[in-house]
Image (cartoon, rainbow, N blue to C red):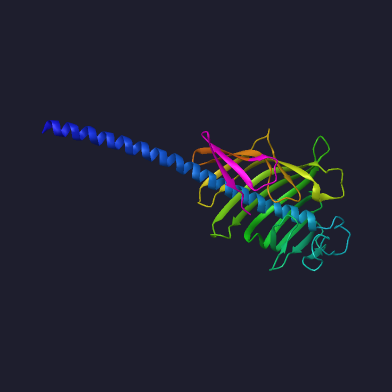
Amino acid sequence: MKTFSYITMIATALFLTVAASSCQKEETAGSMTSLTATSGDIAQSQLAGDEAVSAADDYVPSNVMSAAPQKAPEFAPSDSVKITIDRNNKTYTRVEIDFGTAGITGKRGNVLKGKLLVSIHYITKTRTIEFINFSVNDNQVKGSKTVEYGKNTAGQPTWTITARDTIIRKEDGAMVIWNSDRVRTRTNDNGTPLNLWDDEYSVSGTANGVNAKGKAYTMTIDSNNPLVFFAYYQHIVKGSMVIASEQKSALLDYGDGTKDNKATVTMNGTIKEITLGK
């Protein structure tokens, strides 16, 4: 009887050891899955947020302080975007950019709907961007952004962007919170300073928020490998960042500059390719 109990005890111990090992493997796989999903949430939030800033730059008239209301730029049909300029406030000019409920497809291939309210502040020389029923590819964007324009020590134009955004995804209604402090730098105008559509940019900075599963995350762009994108292309094409969530971290790498919708997530030596969503 004692022998039977001893053998049973050993068998039970071995079973629990194997079970614990199996759970650890599942937990590790789960963490990789979770961080991969978080990487996708971050990429989608960046796309929506950056599209809002780019649209504000595209559609606010360059001579807004003195010009009469203008039609949309030539790359959109003249009647597809309504621009209204309000100069009644003594401290700022407000530009309302209305893409309509049907929306327009911009040159980057993203569908914009709703309105952007761009307030151009005289004293601080910044712009505040607010959203009214605004969406990018039917992903609703709420919150606000502040953009400060300047130049770095090399004389390159910079955009210091503070974002406090909430993205509500079209596919499942999940909410992603995106708080970021980043600097966008125009690194190359390809010798055509009047044509913004072939310009190249780099992005540095950090972000934090909550992913679609309700888990907190942080993001830090590698200062030695900043993000790179082109004005005319939807996705970031180069650069990397470290993403941390649930006491785990992973590297999100956008690649070598090839224009595609692919990136990789690396965690503990395991690499997984992901497709960047819109």
In the image: residue 122, left or right of residue 49: right
25 to 111, vertically: above or below:
above
Q: Nearer the viewer, residue 102 or 96?
A: 102
**In which quadrant of the rendered view does residue 228 lie?**
top right
Q: Which residues are magenta?
A: 254-278
Q: Nearer the viewer, residue 66 or 172?
A: 172
Q: Position of residue 149 (x, y in %)?
A: 79, 46
Q: Quadrant of the N terminus?
A: top left
Question: Residue at the spot x=65%, y=59% of the render?
Answer: 137
Tag count: 0
Question: Residue at the spot x=58%, y=58% of the render?
Answer: 169
Q: Quadrant of the C terminus?
A: bottom right
Q: Nearer the viewer, residue 63 or 74?
A: 74
In the image: residue 153, left or right of residue 133: right
Question: Residue at the spot x=62%, y=60% of the render?
Answer: 140
Q: Is residue 244 magenta?
A: no
In the image: residue 159, left or right of residue 176: right
**In which quadrant of the rendered view does residue 22 lie?**
top left
Q: Main secondary structure of the magenta part?
A: strand
**In which quadrant of the rendered view does residue 64 lie?**
bottom right
Q: Is residue 274 magenta?
A: yes
275 to 83, vertically: above or below:
above
Q: Position of residue 276 (x, y in %)?
A: 62, 49
Q: Position of residue 197 (x, y in %)?
A: 80, 51
Q: Residue farthest to the left?
A: 1
Question: Residue at the spot x=64%, y=56% of the render?
Answer: 143
